[in-house]
Image: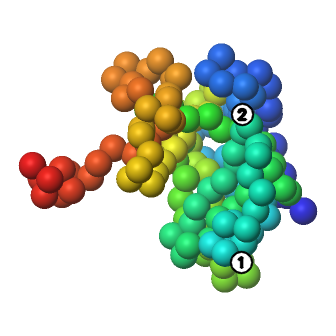
């Protein structure tokens, strides 16, 4: 059963499809919800038939993935922005397994759309252009793909 998200409501977004919007004024650091969905191991994820137009996958550091399309809640509708106002944090939940909690990075007002920087990690054979960003934020990098860490850029240079 998906956890409730009383601080988020789902509505059409000017960025992409549906978005998650804050229902009340919240301070920076406020927990907006937990990303819920079916848990998949790497082998289960590979075996899945993925003909979905929209993907609600959240990868965990332990190699597992949460599929928000199955058993998810309003947090799955948080869109990407290169200038996010929320962050996702992996934590250990009450049952000792990894969970993802979404926190406000800044004070948000009722009606504001919540955004995360997806920071996608893609196969080297794929192009960042295959994952376009439409956020329109000042400094938008044009892709939802993660920026290269400084250490990696220095090693390549």
Find disc 2 in the rendering and name its residue: 20
Residue 107 x %, y %:
53, 33
Find disc 1 in the rendering and name its residue: 94
Q: Residue at x 53, y 22 (%)?
A: 134
Please indicate, yes or no, whether residue 110 appears anywhere in the rendered image.
no
Residue sitting at the far front:
125
Residue 28 x %, y %:
52, 41
Please indicate, yes or no, whether residue 59 appears anywhere in the rendered image.
yes
Badge nearest the viewer, 1 or 2: 2
Q: Residue at x 67, y 75 (%)?
A: 43
Name the image quarter holding residue 60: bottom right
**Crowdedness of circle 2 by 10 Å Cα count: few (<14), some, many (20+)?**
many
Kindly check if marks 1 and 2 are in contact, taking CB atoms under 8 A apart as contact: no
Residue 29 is tagged as none
Residue 48 x %, y %:
76, 62
**Which quadrant of the figure contains the N terminus?**
bottom right
Where is 99 relative to 9, above or below?
below
**Crowdedness of circle 1 by 10 Å Cα count: few (<14), some, many (20+)?**
few
């Amino acid at each position: 059963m998906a956890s409730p998200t009383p601080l988020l409501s789902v509505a059409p977004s000017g960025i992409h499809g549906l978005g998650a919007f804050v229902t009340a004024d919240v301070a920076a650091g406020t927990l907006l919800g937990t990303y819920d969905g079916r848990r998949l191991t790497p082998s289960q994820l590979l075996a899945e038939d993925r003909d979905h137009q929209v993907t609600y996958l959240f990868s965990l550091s332990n190699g597992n993935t949460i599929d928000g399309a199955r058993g998810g809640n309003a947090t799955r509708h948080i869109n990407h922005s290169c200038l996010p106002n929320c962050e996702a944090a992996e934590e250990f939940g009450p049952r000792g397994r990894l969970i993802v909690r979404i926190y406000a990075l800044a004070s948000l007002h009722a009606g504001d759309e919540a955004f995360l920087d997806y920071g996608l990690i893609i196969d080297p054979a794929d192009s960042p252009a295959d994952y376009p960003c439409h956020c329109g934020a000042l400094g938008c990098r044009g892709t939802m793909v993660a920026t290269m860490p400084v250490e990696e850029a220095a090693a390549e240079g």
